[in-house]
């Protein structure tokens, strides 16, 4: 009996194509799954950082306005930074570093004294506002490059007029 070479070759080709398809599908599926995990990890890390930043910034600002020593709890802020360093994009990390630098400048206002000059806070506050918006935009781009650029972010440092009005004479905090 003669071997039907045409049938044998087409069957072998079908088997080979199936095996290659399964392997390629596995590689593509794994790569997609890894990207999805990274997106989820980034989202969680960015959320934790923004929450921790908000808590630190609010305490520093309230201490400044209330003319008292701040009671900043740095543990969650530092933990959020460390977690973010595992997954954040380069741009998000740069923006977070800027926030950290400004938080440090804000903290320095309290070293050995109680700050009394609102003008000392203005450049730090403005910088924190800009750094917050930059971080949010960098985080959004790293999660989805198609997300539109924001000119302001929700939360974070309040509008400067809010700080000025809290500092104004007659509200119980000004001298």
Image (cartoon, rainbow, N blue to C red):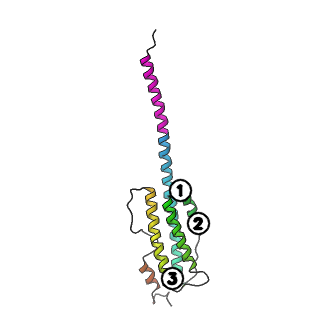
Residue 26 lies, with reference to residue 131, above or below; the image says above
Residue drawn at x 57%, y 76% is: 107
**Category of crowding for the residue at label 2, using alpha-carbon neighbours closer than 10 angstroms: few (below 14), some (14–19), many (at least 20):** some
In what element is the residue under mark 2?
helix
In what element is the residue under mark 1?
helix
Which of the two discs, 2 and 1, labels the residue nearer the N terminus?
2
**Category of crowding for the residue at label 3, using alpha-carbon neighbours closer than 10 angstroms: few (below 14), some (14–19), many (at least 20):** few
Q: Position of residue 108 (x, y in %)?
A: 58, 78
Which of the two discs, 1 and 3, labels the residue nearer the N terminus?
1
Farthest-out residue, right: 112
Which of the two discs, 3 and 2, labels the residue nearer the N terminus?
2
Residue 57 lies, with reference to residue 173, above or below; the image says above
| Distance between the alpha carbons at the discs numbered 2 and 1 | 15 Å
**Which residue position is annotated with label 1?**
87
Residue 6 lies, with reference to residue 29, above or below; the image says above
| Distance between the alpha carbons at the discs numbered 3 and 2 | 25 Å
Where does the magenta region start and end? 1-26
């Amino acid at each position: 009996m003669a071997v039907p070479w045409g049938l044998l070759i087409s069957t072998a080709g079908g088997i080979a194509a199936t095996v290659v398809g399964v392997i390629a599908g596995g590689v593509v599926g794994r790569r997609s799954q890894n990207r999805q995990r990274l997106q989820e990890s980034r989202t969680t890390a960015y959320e934790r950082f923004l929450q921790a930043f908000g808590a630190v910034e609010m305490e520093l600002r309230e201490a400044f306005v209330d003319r008292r020593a701040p009671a900043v709890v740095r543990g969650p802020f530092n933990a959020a930074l460390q977690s973010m360093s595992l997954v954040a994009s380069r741009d998000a990390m740069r923006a977070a570093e800027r926030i950290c630098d400004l938080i440090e400048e804000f903290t320095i206002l309290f070293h050995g004294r109680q700050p009394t000059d609102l003008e000392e806070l203005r450049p730090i506050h403005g910088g924190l506002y800009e750094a917050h918006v930059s971080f949010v935009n960098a985080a959004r781009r790293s999660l989805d490059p198609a997300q539109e650029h924001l000119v302001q972010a929700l939360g974070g440092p309040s509008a400067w007029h809010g700080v000025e009005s809290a500092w104004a004479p007659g509200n119980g905090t000004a001298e």
